[in-house]
């Protein structure tokens, strides 16, 4: 790891100012950032430690929902009373040791896990090069939607769940509906979200609702692993009938991907296995798999179907 | 703002120590290189294997992905700190009795992580042990003996407790 100047800001303003400096990086727990620095994919001159800013470590119950501080750990989130999709997504992320330190803000802002991106030998599009090596290369874990420019998948488990529950990301400058937080490579290929220099996620707000929700993922290894496909589903039920639905696909696109196609199949229908299956198929119909990842188009609908059924039943 | 070596006060295995190191050193590196506590092992260095796990304020964390500078004021326990008053921890005894280590490289991480589990759950079910140890890889044992050793240690610890020792 390259040496750096360690900045211990005493306030958000100080942190923001230090982070706005070119060559500076924000650090929360550092699980993702240290990995990037060890691989020398990130070589900051300054590391700005958010942990030294006070606060942002609590989940606060408000009259209409929850405020989750950016430094709340995934373990805290998994043990909380937030909607089921969110606690399940946090509880399935990474390993127990990692969940004890990894933060919600860091989870949302973590960089892609694409092996070309993480390998210093490849000057890929996302690192300022001219090619996405995954498009013609090894792309088993890559995107099957929006994969024409760069085929990363967004690595966060928690993001699809927060999107299904319509959460809001709050920064030191503004509130951003999570639906508008993540960006596609066709808009920005060098970052995954709308955050500007010196902008810091301070909390995530989740509204209380009568929607029931579920998160489900498939992975190669049972003990812990990155999802090959995941789905977060929130349903507003009236008896057995789906009044409204939010369906989000994870690990299949450079952003957590809302599927209006899947939602349309569900809304107004009595929830049955057949309808859940149809929604799963509709959600994956427009997929454009690469050479090695067509399996996601088969596993994805089955996983989504199960997520829908567990949200609604 | 820190770039050169800084003097940092750490608390490791119940002792206060002063160490000087550069900001980019991980907790794993400081433990091994500056404090001579080589029980904690280097494995993948990327969070995948758990062999570097230590306890920070009683919770298992990966020392390869933690900056040592962030550890000021925290209570760090490594495998060297498990034995108390010259007696091995019941987990260490059970691992030895059942042959739950072969090459032993993964053992410190398993011991520290299991200790935290048994402190919050004195009688964990097999699935709970599996879940708690999901982030620890072992290339030798096939895991069965490790799970059995944790169960044996838990049973012995419960017994000692009821006997009031
Ligand atoms: C072996 C392994 C398996 C994993 N498996 C999963 C998995 O299955 N699912 C999953 O979701 N994740 C997984 N992860 C990723 C892990 O959850 C993230 O690395 C972690 O959540 C990052 O949080 P952090 O606090 O350590 O962030 P850091 O590493 O400190 O920061 C990550 C990035 O976010 C930026 N950042 C951090 N906080 C803020 C903030 N408040 N405002 C603005 N920018 C910020 C930093 O600048 C940095 O670029 C895995 C990681 C490992 C090592
Ligand atoms: S060395 Fe830390 S997890 Fe492998
Ligand atoms: S005993 Fe060799 S890796 Fe576990």
Image (cartoon, grey):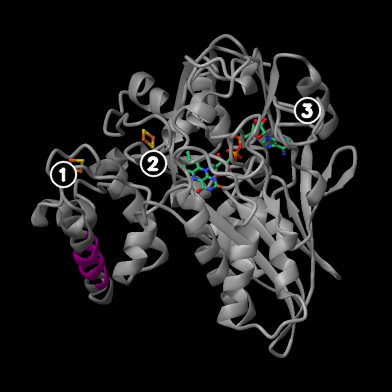
Q: Quadrant of residue A27?
A: top right
- Image quarter where the C terminus of chain A lies is bottom right
Of residues A157 and A207, which is closer to you in this image?
Answer: A157
Q: Which residue is mark 1?
A: B140
The x and y percentages for residue B72 are 55, 32
Q: Chain of mark 3?
A: A
Q: Which mark is residue B54?
A: 2
Which quadrant would residue A144 be assigned to in this image? top right
| Nearer the observer, A275 or A223 | A275
- Contact flag, marks 1 and 2 (Cβ < 8 Å): no
> For the residue carrying disc 1, how many other residues have a C-alpha within 10 Å: few (<14), some (14-19), or many (20+)?
few
Drawn side of residue B115 relative to residue A148, left or right:
left
**Helix, strand or loop at disc 2?**
strand
Q: Is mark 2 within 8 Å of ligand 2?
A: no
A167 left or right of A151 in image? right
For label 3, the residue is A15
Decide: few, some or many residues near mark 3? Use Cα within 10 Å; few <14, some 14-19, many ≥20: many
The residue sitting at the top extreme is B4
Circle 1 or circle 2, nearest the eye: 1
- Residue extending furthest right? A174
State which region is magenta. B150-158
Q: Position of residue B140 (x, y in %)?
A: 16, 44
Residues indicated by labels 3 and 2 sit on the same polypeptide chain: no
User: In this rendering, is residue A144 above or below A168?
Assistant: above
Residue at 57 percent across and 41 percent down: it is A143
């Amino acid at each position: 790891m390259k040496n750096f100047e360690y900045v211990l800001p005493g306030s958000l303003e100080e942190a923001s100012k230090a982070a706005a400096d070119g060559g500076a990086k924000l650090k929360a727990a550092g699980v993702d950032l240290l990995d990037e620095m060890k691989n020398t994919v990130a070589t900051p001159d300054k590391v700005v430690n958010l942990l030294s800013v006070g606060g942002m470590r609590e989940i606060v119950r408000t009259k209409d929902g929850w405020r989750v501080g950016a430094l709340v750990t995934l373990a805290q989130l998994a043990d909380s009373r937030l909607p089921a999709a969110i606690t399940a997504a946090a509880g399935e992320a990474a390993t127990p040791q990692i969940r004890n330190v990894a933060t919600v803000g860091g989870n949302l802002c973590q960089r892609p896990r694409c092996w070309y991106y993480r390998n210093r030998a490849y000057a890929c599009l996302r690192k300022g090069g001219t090619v996405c090596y995954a498009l013609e290369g090894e792309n088993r874990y890559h995107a099957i939607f929006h994969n024409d420019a760069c085929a990363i998948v967004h690595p966060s488990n928690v993001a699809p769940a927060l999107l299904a529950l319509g959460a809001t990301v709050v920064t030191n400058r503004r509130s951003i509906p999570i639906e508008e937080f993540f960006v596609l490579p066709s808009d920005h290929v060098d970052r995954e979200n709308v955050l500007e220099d010196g902008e810091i996620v301070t909390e995530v707000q989740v509204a209380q609702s009568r929607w029931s929700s579920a998160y489900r993922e498939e992975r190669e290894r049972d003990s812990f692993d990155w999802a090959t496909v995941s789905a977060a589903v929130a349903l507003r039920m009236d008896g057995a009938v789906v009044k409204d639905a939010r369906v989000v696909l994870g690990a299949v696109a450079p952003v957590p991907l809302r599927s209006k196609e899947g939602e349309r199949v569900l809304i107004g229908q009595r929830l049955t296995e057949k309808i859940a299956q149809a929604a799963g198929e509709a959600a994956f119909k427009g997929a454009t798999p690469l050479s090695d990842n067509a399996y996601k188009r088969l596993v994805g609908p089955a996983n989504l179907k199960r997520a829908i059924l567990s949200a609604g039943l | 703002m820190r770039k050169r070596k800084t003097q940092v006060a750490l608390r490791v295995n119940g002792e206060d120590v002063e160490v000087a190191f550069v900001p980019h050193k991980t907790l794993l590196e400081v433990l091994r290189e500056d404090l001579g506590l080589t029980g904690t092992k280097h494995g993948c260095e990327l969070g995948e294997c758990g062999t570097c796990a230590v306890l920070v304020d009683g919770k298992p964390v990966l020392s390869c992905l933690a900056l040592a500078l962030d550890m000021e004021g925290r209570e760090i326990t490594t495998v060297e700190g498990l034995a108390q008053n010259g007696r091995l921890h019941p987990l260490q005894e059970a691992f030895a009795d059942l042959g739950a280590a072969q090459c032993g490289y993964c053992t410190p991480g398993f011991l520290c992580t299991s200790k935290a589990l048994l402190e919050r759950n004195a009688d964990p079910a097999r699935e709970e042990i599996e879940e708690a140890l999901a982030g620890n890889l072992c290339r030798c044992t096939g895991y069965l003996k490790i799970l059995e050793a944790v169960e044996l240690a838990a049973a012995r610890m419960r017994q000692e407790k009821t006997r009031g020792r």
